Amino acid sequence: MRHFLLALGAAVSIPTAFAADCDRTCLKGVLDQYLNAVVQHNPSAVPLTPGYRQTENAVVTRPGQGIWQTAKALGKVQRRYFDPVTQSAAYFGTLEETSGNAAVVTLRLLVAGRKVAEAEWYLARKGAPGIGVGAGAQANAAFWDPDYLAAHPPVERVVPKAGRVSREDLIAITNSYFDSLSARDGHIMIAHPGCVRLENGVLTTQRDAPANLPPNAAGVFQGKTDCMNEAAMANIYAVVGRRFPVVDEEAGVVLGLGVFLRKPGVAMRRNQFSEWFVIDQGKLSAIYSSMFYPDQDALVPNWPPYDGNWPVLPGPK
C-alpha cells in the first residue's frame, strides 16, 4: 500500500501536459530546427505533432505553404525568447523573403513532447494594407522599416536573478499597457518616462510633443513623446483578445497578443498585434511590435480561447 501511495503521489504531482518538459536549451533547439526547416522549405526537417496548427496573420495554412515557400533566410535582427512554464519558444526580428524584402516578424511556437504543436506567425511586409481613412501615414500602407529595427534592435541580456521581476508581475505590468490604451489614460501604464515603441520597425515615440500640452501631461519626457503619450491612443476603442503566451523571466521580456478595436462607426481597420515588452526594474522601457490590419470580415485572432472572429462592433444605422 505504501508503495502504491508513493507511486500515486508521484503521478499526480506532474501535470500530464508537461510530463516531458523542454527546458530552455531544448526549446532553443526546437525553435532553431523549425526556423531552419522553414528557410529550407522542408516541413519534414522538424518534428511536428499530428495536430500541428499554423497561422500566418490569423489565416490557417498547411505545412509547406505560405511562409514555407517565401522564406529565404533569417534577417539582420534575430531575438529568441523561451518560456519553459508554457513550453513556448518564440522569435522576433526580420526574415528575408523571396520577394527581395525583409518582413518584420513574430513567431510563437508551442512545444509538446519536443515536437512543434502550434506556430503563430505575424508578418509585417512592405506595402501591406494600412489602417484606413484618417490614419495619416498609415492610411494606405502599414508601417514597415526593417532597417531602422536593425539599427535599434531589442537588447539581448540575461537579467541577474536579484533584479528579476516575478512572472505574475511581468504579466501585470504588460497588461497595464493594454489597460492604459483601452482607458486612453497614460497614467495607468507602469512605464519609465521616455519609454520607446517601434511598430513594424518604425519609431512611433520620441517625437516633439505638442506645445499646448501641460508640463505634467502623461507620456511626455523632456519635450518628446513616449509610450505613455495619450494622443496615440485616440483611435483605439478597446484592446481585446489579450494573451500572454511567452514570459521570458531571464530576459525580462513578455509577448503580448491581442486586437485593437475601433469605435463603432469608424471606418478604420482593426490591428491584430504581437508586441514584445522589455521590462526594467518593474517598469516598461521598450515595446517592439509586428502587427497587421485585417479586413473587417477577417477571422482574428483565430487562436484559443478566441477561436475565429472577434466581433466587429456594428456602425450606426
Image: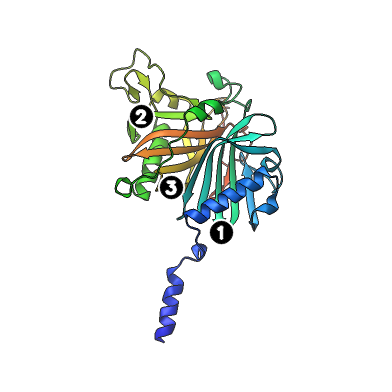
Q: Residues within 10 Å of mark 1 (few under 14, many from 20)?
A: many
Which of the 4 image quarters holds residue 145? top right
Q: Which residue is mark 3?
A: 248
Against 24, residue 200 (above or below) is: above
* Front in this rendered view, residue 300 or 288: 288
As measured in the structure, the alpha-carbon distance from the residue carrying label 2 to the one carrying label 3 is 25 Å
Disc 2 designates what residue?
Answer: 186
Circle nearer the N terminus (2, 1)? 1
Q: How is the image coloured?
A: rainbow
- Residue at 44%, 77% (x, y): give it: 8
* Residue with the mark numbered 1: 112
The residue shown at (64%, 25%) is 127
Callout 2 amino acid: Gly
- Residue 277 placement (x, y as % from top left): 43, 38
Mark 2 to mark 1 CA distance (whole Å)? 39 Å
The quadrant of the rendering that contains the N terminus is bottom left
Q: Position of residue 164 (x, y in %)?
A: 33, 46
Q: Identity of the amino acid at label 3?
A: Asp
Residue at x-position 69% and y-position 37% = 70
For marks 2 and 3, the one nearer the N-term is 2
Q: Nearer the viewer, mark 2 or mark 3?
A: 3
Is residue 271 shown to the viewer in this render?
Answer: no
